[in-house]
Amino acid sequence: MTSDENPNYKPDFDELIPLSDAADISGLSPDHLRRLVRNGDLWGTKIGRNWVTTLKVVEEYIARDRKPGPKPKSVD
């Protein structure tokens, strides 16, 4: 079961990778990944002073259909 299918997703300790490694894999910055974790868009947690996630979660996020860049302004 993946993080998308289960909001209570908790990986094994062996699966955890630091966000710096996730940044290298995804092409996103560690700061951006931390923001995604804080917003709930990407599973991750803080252990001590280090943020971690899993390779599976990063790959799932990359595979999602998303539109980068500024969002269009709504016309009222």
Image: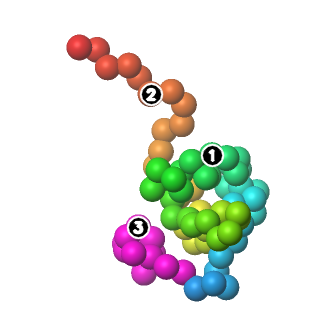
Residue at numbered disc 1:
32
| In the image: residue 40, left or right of residue 54 | left
Which dot marks residue 4? 3
Q: Earlier in the sequence, mark 3 or mark 2?
A: 3
Residue 55 in sight here: no
| In the image: residue 32, left or right of residue 68 | right
The image quadrant that residue 50 belongs to is bottom right
Q: Earlier in the sequence, mark 2 or mark 1?
A: 1
- Is the residue marked by circle 1 packed among few (<14), some (14-19), or many (20+) residues within 10 Å? few
Residue 7 falls within the magenta-colored stretch = yes
Instruction: Tell me how far mark 3 sits from mark 1, CA to CA.
Output: 19 Å
15 over 49 or under it: above or below: below
The image quadrant that residue 68 belongs to is top right
Query: What are the residue bounds of the magenta stretch?
Result: 1-11
Residue 15 falls within the magenta-colored stretch = no
Residue 46 in sight here: yes
Main secondary structure type of the part rendered in magenta: loop
The residue that appears at 32% across and 20% down in the rendered structure is 74
Q: Earlier in the sequence, mark 3 or mark 1?
A: 3
Q: Position of residue 43 (x, y in %)?
A: 51, 64
